[in-house]
Amino acid sequence: MTCEEALKLLYEVIDKEANQIDSEKVKRHLEDCQHCMARYEFEAMFKTFVTEKGASRNRTDLLKQRIQDRISDAGESGSRFQLRSFRSRPVIISAAAALVLCVVAALATAQFFRHKSFVYPFEKEHFNAHPVNFEAVNDDDCIKEINSYLTPHFSLALGEKVAGYELTHYGIDEIRGHKFMHLHYRNGTSKVSLFIGQYSPQNLPDFEKAIHSGIEYFRHVCLQCQVVYWKQGNAVAIAVSENKELDLPQLASALGAI
Amino acid sequence: MSDRQSGNDHKKERFNKEALVHLDSLYRTALRMTRNENEAEDLVQETFLKAYRFWDKFEEGSNCRAWLFKIMTNIFINNYRAKSRTPQVVEFEDVDDDFLFGQLAALGPSENPEQHFFAKVFDDDVKRAIEDLPEDFRLVVVLSFLEGFSYEEIAEIAGLNIGTVKSRLHRGRKLLQKALWDYAVKNGFIKEPAK
């Protein structure tokens, strides 16, 4: 197989649509041709990348309720409306091609997610970790840095409960290019996230912008959420919860953030 | 009367179990297609109400998710496309097949430019790039990339032949890569090499 032939099948192989014979031929070609291999790896990475980043997580529970209500009201009716039925297509994928793709996908995934932080419940744009220096940071350094943001009362012990809320995760993210630490708490199904950043002489004017865009963002994407924020010395904290009943300022204070 | 009642309950139960479970997936696509939360909700609601009305036409054991997407695509094309402000006929500048790959490779072999690029581009940029694709390309890209449908399923859902699905997907990929490269350059994540 020539490079030209291999590249002609590029997307079909990546999309797992190529037949077994073609996939085999491509696989053999890729073993010998670094250039084509690089291109295949890149396109597979690109697909994973778009699939991961292009999908939103949305709140659809209200919509679901509305549809169910409407269905309960709906009368029965028949009509001429016809659709050709779909039958699940038997999936024939060559094991070899699948293996190549698994390796490629694993590589791609490892590269994408090594840095991906846990950002529940806001797996959204601003907080999709573009982390600062996680690569060099081990847990101890991370804790040291985080501690420098906090009041002395603040506890960073994972699993420790304050006012019924347990710290489940912490880390450092960037919001609009500014370093924030985030802490995630959980009490049963009720969840609270704290984001804490520091003013510094270097970041002065646009740090405000980062905070406000963060707050705006939460209010915008999460209509059911409550958002509170406050300043303390040179630190600013934003607390967000999906639980509207919760006394968020009081909890934040109990957690030691104020 | 009670028979009819229990028949209805049974229908609702089956519909809940087999159709409504695909709500998130349909909404995700509706959002990319309408680019507007309210319209996306309306579109999804209309799709499910229609699906419920014709539930007895749906063959048990066949692919319910694809069936729902076909209904939604038809509603979208008939009712929403007309409202769209973007023109349907778009002239494209020609983009090479390996445009992004080539651009990144040109940045230099030593520093893993692909990884840098993929790490820097924001979710927002990806969503916007998808939403900015002309509708014909957007539909096949969303159905393939985000929803994982096969070429054959996409052909069935969108009422196209497989060759058209392939060529639109190919073109959609290139446009997406070009758009993301442009964002990365514009946002300063990547310095475009001097020509």
Image: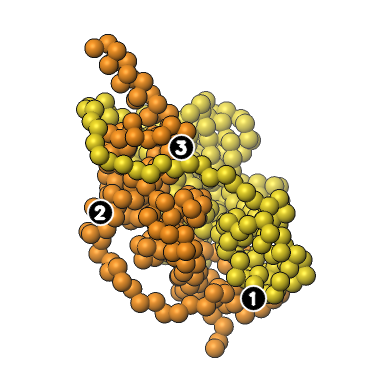
Chain colours: A yellow, B orange
- Helix, strand or loop at label 1? It is helix
Q: Is residue B117 above or below residue B19?
A: below
Specify which label sits upstream in the sequence, 3 or 2. 3
Residue A176 image position (x, y, % from top left):
47, 60
- Kind of residue at disc 3: Ser
Q: Is residue A203 visible?
A: no
- Rendered residue at 33%/31% (across/down): B56
Residue A58 image position (x, y, % from top left):
41, 44
Chain letter of disc 1?
A
Foreground residue among A188 and B126: B126
Residue ID for mark 1: A4
Foreground residue among B149 and A121: B149
Q: Residues within 10 Å of mark 3 (few under 14, many from 20)?
A: some
Q: Is residue B100 above or below residue B79?
A: below
Residue ID for mark 2: B78
Residue ID for mark 3: B62
Q: Disc 2 versus disc 1: distance between alpha carbons?
A: 41 Å
